[in-house]
Amino acid sequence: MSKKRKNHNFLIQGSILAIASMVSRVIGIIYRVPLNHIIGDSGMGYYQFAFEMYSILLIISSYSLPLAVSKLVSARVANGEYKNAHYIFKHALQFAACVGLLVAIIDFAGAELFAKVSKYSESVLAIRTLAPTLLILAILGVFRGYFQGLGTMMPTAASNIIEQIVNAIVSVGAAWILFDIGMESGRELAFGAAGGTIGTGAGALAALLFTIFIYLMYCRIMKKKIRRDTVSSVHPVHNVYKMLIITILPVIFSTAVYNISGLLDGQIFSNVEYYKGVEESVYSGLYGIYSSKYRVLMNVPIAIASALASSIIPTLVASMTMKEYKSVKRKIDYSIRFSMIIAIPCAVGLAVLSGPIISLIWGPDEMATEMMRIGAVSVVFYSLSTITNAVLQGIDKMKIPVIHAGISVVTHIIILIIMLSVFDMSIQAVVIADALFALLICILNGLALKRYIRYKQEYIKTFLLPGIAAAIMGAVAYYTYTGIYKITGRNVVGIGMAVLFAVLVYGLLLLAFKAVNEDEIRSMPKGAALVRILKKFHML
C-alpha cells in the first residue's frame, strides 16, 4: 500500500463505520417512534434517564475499552509485534469481564438511589434491566478495539447494525408486553420503559456473538502473523494491566466529563422545575421530548464524527510511533475538513427542515421543532469537539481532554442554572447550555493542538466555504420543500425532493468554490469512481 493510500485509509475505514453508525442511528429513530406511542413522552423521560445513568456507568465499564485497546494494539502492530498485540487483547478481555461485572452490580444495587436523587421515581426498573448489558458491552468493547487496532472497522460496523436491529425488535415488543402487564398495578410507564431497555441488552448480546464469530474466523490469519513475529518480547501480566489502566483512566475521565453533561442536564432541569412547583409528569414529558426526539435526531449526523474519531486514533498512534509528524498533521487536516464538510450542511438542513422532519417521524411537535431550530448548530460543535478530542488522545495528550471537558462542564452548569432560575427559562435552557458546552471544548482543544504540535487550523476551505455553500443549500431546501408541499400536500415528498436538491446544490457549490480537490475526493469511499464521473462531465 502506498504512503498516500495509507494516509487516506483511515478516512475510508472511518467512512465505513460512519455509514454503519448512520444506519444504526436511523434504526434507533425508527424504533423509538412506536416506543414513544406505547409509553408516551413521560415514559420516554424515564426511559431516557435510565439511559443517561447507564451511559455514565458504561463509560466506566466499557466505553473507553475500544479506544484503549485499539491504541495499544495499533502501536504494537506498527512495529510488527503481533504476539504482544494478541497478548494485550487476551488480558484486556479479563480486565473487561471484572470491571463490567462490578459496574453491573453497582447499577443493579444503586437503581433506587439513582432514581430517588434524580426525581425520576419510575425509572428504577429501567435502570436495573440495563445492568447485564454493562458486562456484555465491556467484553464486546475489547473485541471491537482489537479489530480497530488492526486497522479494520468492518467488524465494528457490522456488529453496530446487528445490535440496533435486534435492539429495535426486542425493545418495541418487550415495551408493548410489559406496558400491558404494568397496567394491572398502575405502573405501566415504569414497566414500559423497562421493556424498552431490555432490547438494549438483547442487541448487545447479538453483536457480541457476531463479533466472536468474526474473531474465530480471523484466528488462523493472526496465528500465522504471531508465528512470524520475531520482535516481540512478551510483557509480564502486571505490565499489561498497568498499560491498560494508564491508557483507560484518562479516557474514562475525559469521556465521563464529556458525557456527564447530559445526566447533569436532566438532574438540574428536573430539580429546578420540581422546586418551582412543576409537576413531575410535565418536566418528565419535556425532558422526554428533548432526549428522545431532539437529541436522538441530532446524534445521527454526529455519528459521522464519532466514527472518524474511532478510525483516526489507531492511525495517529501508528504515525506518532514511527515519528511521521507531517503525516500526523495531514491526517488531522483531512479528518477535521471531512467532518465539517458533512456536519455544517447537516446542521443547516436540520434547522431549515426541523418541522417537516419531526412531523414525518413523530408527528407535529412544536416544542421539538423549536429545540431543533435553536440547537441545530450543536451538530457542528459536537462533531468538531469529538474529532479534536480523538486527535489529542491519538497524539498521547490524554489528560488534556479531561481538563477541557471539566472546564466546559462547570461553565455549562453555571449557565444552565442561571437560565433556569434567574431567567425562568424551561427546556430551551438545556438546549442552549448544551451547545455552549460543546463550543467551549472546540475552542480549548483548538488552542491545545496549536500549542502541542504547532497545528495551524485552515479556516477558508474547512469552515467558510462549506458554510456559504450550506447557507445557499438551506435556502434551496426550504423553498423546494415549501413549493413541493403546496403542490402535492405530502410531507414525505416535499422532504425527499428538498433533500435531493439540497445534496446536489451543496455538492456542486463545493466543487465551484474549490472547497474540495481531487485528492480529497479520492480519499472517500468510491472516490476514484466519483472522480471519473466528475471529470467526464468536466466538473473537476
Image: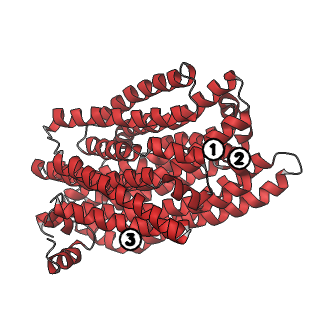
Task: Label 1: state its secondary structure.
Answer: helix
Q: Amino acid at mark 2?
A: Gly
Q: Position of residue 378 (x, y in %)?
A: 40, 43
Q: What residue did someone put label 2 on? A: 43
Q: Which residue is mark 1?
A: 288
Numbered circle sitting on residue 487: none
Mark 3 or mark 1, which is nearer to you? 1
Q: Which quarter of the rendering shows the N terminus?
A: bottom left
Mark 2 is surrounded, within 10 Å at the Cα level, by few (under 14), some (14 to 19) or many (20 or more) other residues, namely many
Percent from the top left, x then y, of residue 473? 32, 58
Q: Position of residue 220 (x, y in %)?
A: 36, 74
At x 66% / y 63%, what residue is drawn? 170
Which residue is disc 3 drawn over? 219
- Frontmost residue, 463 versus 45: 463
3 and 1 marks in contact (CB < 8 Å) = no
> Disc 2 vs disc 1: Cβ atoms closer than 8 Å?
yes
Q: Residues within 10 Å of mark 3 (few under 14, many from 20)?
A: few
